[in-house]
Amino acid sequence: MQNSFPPEELRGVYRAIYERRDVRSQFLSDPVPDLLLGRLLQAAHHGPSVGFMQPWDFIVIRSPEVRRAIHENFIDANRQAAKIYSNGRRELYDGLKLAGIVDAPLNLCVTCDHDRTLGAGLGRQSDPATDLYSTACAVQNLWLAARAEGIGVGWVSILNPERLRALLEIPERITPVAYLCLGYVTDFASRPELETRGWERRESLARLIHFDGWSEQDEQRAASLLSS
């Protein structure tokens, strides 16, 4: 079709999407070259943003001391998070490795500036949270580019945000959106770890598709769409 990528490039895009993983435990100690990091940040900076507001900033963290302090934050937050689980689910939770903060050679904090004036507010009048959504799109761009470059990425969500803000000296108007661990890895798993470990399964897409409104759910029609 007109404007579509050549087949081999198209396959590469979909391969990055399907083979992207949240990496926590396969990091190698090899440093991420600056030239490669620059490409990943450029990919993130070319993410879509409502009104072209570009609300993101990127804090590159290589210091072992800073990463150890962030890891202490994770340990405390993870101890609190574990309390909501019991029995077999708690045992499974305790066996999961949920962060590679000190294992990965590079950490990256992606933030959202709520006061950024770029875009003159276009598209934000009815939903101010679009700046956060836009920042998440930048994260996804970086993640897909990283997979194509052979770089693993792990998103650490189990952190106390105020402690993180203090450790990285992030201003109050700025929201930390994603704390990422980056590095070369031994391999990329064929399926998400949480799926292989039995924590959760991938939901059937056909159950999530609606037609002409929320109540118009037709799983058979959706299945037909997906198989076409």
Image (spheres, grey):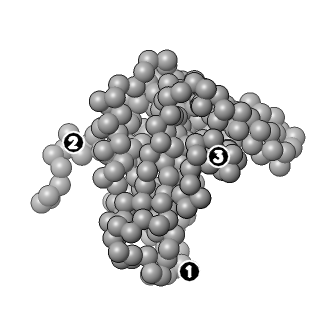
Asked whether 178 or 217 is in front, the reply is 178
Residue holding disc 1: 215
Judge from the rendering whether residue 7 lies leftward or rightward of residue 49; answer left or right: left
Q: Residue at x 74, y 30 (%)?
A: 95
Q: Which of marks 1 and 2 is nearer the N terminus?
A: 2
In which quadrant will I find the N terminus?
A: bottom left
139 is higher (above) or lower (below) than 1:
above
94 is higher (above) or lower (below) than 206:
above
| Image location of residue 211, percent across then percent down | 45, 77
Q: What residue type is labelled 2?
A: Glu
Element class at badge 1:
loop
- Residue 9 has which mark? 2
Q: Which amino acid does label 1 sit on?
A: Ser
Q: Which of marks 3 and 1 is nearer the N terminus?
A: 3
Q: Which residue is drawn at 56% across and 80% down?
A: 215
Mark 3–mark 2 Cα distance, whole angstroms, equals 43 Å
Element class at badge 2:
helix
